[in-house]
Amino acid sequence: MAEIINLRQIRKAKARAEADTKAEANRIAFGQPKKAKTLQQRRKALETERHEGHRLARHEPDSDPNA
């Protein structure tokens, strides 16, 4: 006699496995610890500050009084 299987359970198990695979790929692609994120933000801010500090004259955007 053949084994009886529940197709709904098989479908759900397959969907869970696919979701786990996608989640693992996303963790690899987008996962970054908070400490690394803050360090990167600080470095970028410092780099921007140094870059802006070398300007000879600061250009302020013209504000339109009619806007």
Image (cartoon, rainbow, N blue to C red):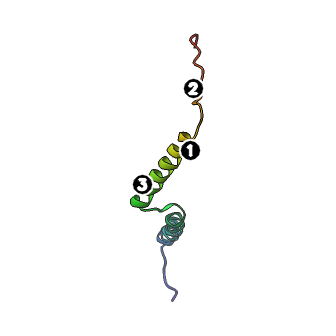
Compare residues 13 and 58 and report the one nearer the observer.
Answer: 58
Question: Where's residue 28, x and y in %?
Answer: 52, 67
Report helix, strand or loop for mark 1. Answer: helix
Looking at the rendered structure, the kind of residue marked 1 is His
Read off the residue under disc 2: 60
Residue at 44% over, 60% down: 36
Q: Residue furthest left?
A: 35
Compare residues 67 and 27 and report the one nearer the observer.
Answer: 67
Q: Earlier in the sequence, mark 2 or mark 3?
A: 3
Looking at the rendered structure, the kind of residue marked 3 is Thr
Residue at 46% over, 62% down: 32
Residue at 48% over, 62% down: 31
Question: Where's residue 4, x and y in %?
Answer: 48, 80
Q: Nearer the viewer, mark 2 or mark 3?
A: 2
Read off the residue under disc 1: 51
State the mark number for residue 26. Answer: none
Residue at 46% over, 51% down: 41
Read off the residue under disc 3: 38
Tag 1: Cα neighbours inside 10 Å, few (<14), some, or many (≥20)?
few
Compare residues 42 and 35 and report the one nearer the observer.
Answer: 42
